Image (cartoon, coloured by chain):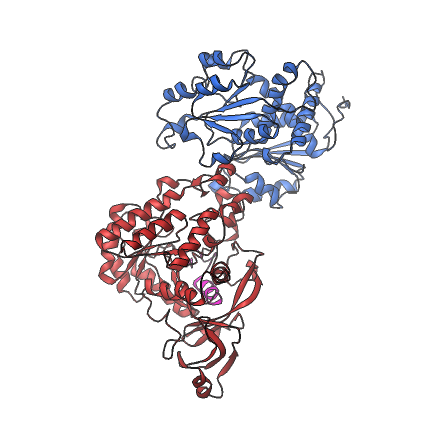
Chain colours: A blue, B red
Amino acid sequence: MRHLLSAGDLTPAEAVTILDTAAQMAATQEREIKKLPTLRGRTVVNLFFEDSTRTRISFETAAKRLSADVINFSAKGSSVSKGESLKDTALTLQAMGADAVVIRHQASGAPHTLATSGWTHGAVVNAGDGTHQHPTQALLDAYTLRRHLVGDGGRSDVTGRDLEGLKVAIVGDVLHSRVARSNVQLLHTLGAEVTLVGPPTLVPVGVGAWTARVSYHLDEVIADEKPDAVMMLRVQRERMSSAGGGFFPSPLEYTRGYGLDARRLAALPDHAIVLHPGPMNRGLEISADAADSPRAVIVEQVANGVAVRMAVLYLLLAGGAPATNERADA
Amino acid sequence: MTDYLLTDVSPLGEAATDVLLADGRIAALGADARARANDDAVTIDGAGLVLLPGLVDLHTHLREPGREDAETIRTGTRAAALGGFTAVHAMANTSPTQDTAGVVEQVWRLGREAGWVDVHPVGAVTVGLEGERLAELGAMADSQAQVRVFSDDGRCVHDPVVMRRALEYVKAFDGVVAQHAQEPRLTEGAQMHEGVVSAELGLAGWPAVAEEAIIARDVLLAEHVGSRLHVCHLSTAGSVEIVRWAKSRGIDVTAEATPHHLVLTDEEARGYDPVFKVNPPLRTQADVDAVRAGLEDGTIDIVATDHAPHTREDKDCEWAAAAFGMTGLETALSVVQETMVDTGRMTWADVARVLSTNPARIGRVADHGRPVAVGEPANLVLVDPAARRTVVPEEQATKSTNSPFRGRELHGRVVATFLRGRATVLDGAPVDESQVVA
């Protein structure tokens, strides 16, 4: 693995290796001293062309726990708005000696362009590009699903296990969601069955080629498929306005059709869990009842995000199996 | 002026003969040609070569005035000559816009001074391409540039009333409105063809219906007011169907396809290389097949390049930030040969029709697109269909390098181009600039 650009690039074995490595990383995070010396002397650049405090902090924490030097480069106003171009920014970072570039960009394909252009020699990690991909989010979701739903709900060792047979419903604005695209590919790679649920306006033309079922009716999916997990996607309020595309008539109508509330939560199988990539719009796609219920693993997803990103940075920069017994210098 | 004796050439791919060019005209054909050639006539061995009327491009972006960093009238017309063209129509989306008699005359004059091909400026339909009020179409028609083709290309004349008025108004001087068919609301922020590939790549879709809806509206408007309409760069199977239907009703519509829509598909976007970002976007294989079929059966009247040079900085970036467009003047004939002639779907006479006769007729260009016959103006191109060449954009005459065919081996090569009997290209290379300036 030279870069991590798309969840679709991962083989089943690679995906399971990342999850297993993440589990080992998570174990180290239970210790009093959480820092590992593994990436000492290496430089990880967080190159964020789009605001995302959560994702940036998660990557920053992951890199620091591995003892890498971290440079945060916030470049709001890319070449799209005629600021400094992606190319010049990348060349600058290359000159500073970045071993890995974690990139968040509003343009779909920007990480791909960065990785294939020769502008940087470092490993490129896609931290979310436009409406294309967000592979570490899918990996942390898969990790969370495996922890809760595989091997007696985490009571037995799940090392080496995939998500064979799990049923996952992904609900909401699929059209604009890089989280949905990444999860459809990765969860399929890992053997899960994905059903996409949303109003037809928020499902892309061409979705028929995806490895997922599509439904426009959340209640039917909950009743008929009895999903093991429901992943709620963030819906931006501006999407309903005419200027935002007029994708649905009103927030209330959206919530009635696709919001996860107490009633729908109760209709889910007892073991089913609720995921959300955050940040949540409480009252729109998810009610407080659902978000705060014991079946919601949303806060845990954040913690798992650090472990998964540690695993990704580790596998890209150090290679091989992790030696988590090493201790950081005091 | 040098006379040229072309020996053993095949006019329109038919039986080989000799052709004498003298005094800017085709002076003699057959045995007569050798007999009448004077001693200092330059002989070109044309064995195996096809002689066509000089190609006429109805859709070229020369970028001057305004974006001389991407192309100038000199570099663009030199590229045109190398591609076998003797006349090009320079699109109106310059800066300032070609929406007044003054600007179109300037472009026309710069074209004459360059001397590589005849430059026929296209006039903007609306002031500043804004789609709101008609530009002074009559003044442009009456100017020295004698504009007959009007287009807001790059933008669509989307307001149905403005389009209707334009269609009606240009009848007074036998003009034609060349529509860039793109419903603007359906294509806000659009980056590529909407379908399976855009869904996966997360690039905003440019649906086929946004083109087809405008074409359907426009053919009905043209029928209603009894005007002629030209459809620029038609790209979808549905558009071919609509034009076929319109022609069957007797509507006076002509349609063009670009070389790239004859051969490339939206699959090219997968590498996010903006060289494949173009408007209208590359479509699916089914669309490519339909466009080829439409060209073969005459539904599509012409091939036009939509040559759209862009600077490196406008293409060396992420997809969404890149400009739309690709170069085409120096590769168009090869693409048509490869997709239509070498596949047996068209003859060289058909090539002459779609790349010369028909575009000259639509643009009302009198001295181009003429038969290869004695007395006709010697606007000609000599093609070697057996040649194979690999595209190296940096070696092309166009100032820009955004060719989608980089590294690709193309069929056929232009050996020589003649503008009114004067060679602009010989042995596949442009002649010295001092030779072309009139």
Q: Is residue B311 left or right of residue B89?
A: right
Q: Is residue B99 left or right of residue A294?
A: left
Quarter of the figure with the N terminus of chain B: bottom left
Percent across and percent down for residue B224 are 22, 51
What residue do we see at 37% from left, 19% from top? A252
Q: Is residue B308 left or right of residue A145?
A: left
User: As drawn, which residue projects farthest toward the front?
Assistant: B344
**Front-lying residue, A329 or B21:** B21
Percent across and percent down for residue B45 are 53, 78
Q: Does residue B73 show up magenta in the picture?
A: yes
What residue do we see at 49% from left, 58% from top? B339
Quarter of the figure with the C terminus of chain B: bottom left
Q: Is residue B225 above or below residue A144?
A: below
Q: Is residue A280 above or below residue B271?
A: above
**Snapshot quadrant of residue B388:** bottom right
Q: Does residue B105 show up magenta in the picture?
A: no
**Snapshot quadrant of residue B352:** bottom left
Badge count: 0
**Front-lying residue, B265 or B312:** B265
Q: Is residue A177 above or below residue B102?
A: above
Q: Is residue A167 left or right of residue B105?
A: right
Q: Which residues are magenta?
A: B62-83
**Front-lying residue, B63 or B359:** B359
Percent across and percent down for residue A179 are 53, 29
Residue A201 can be seen in this image = yes
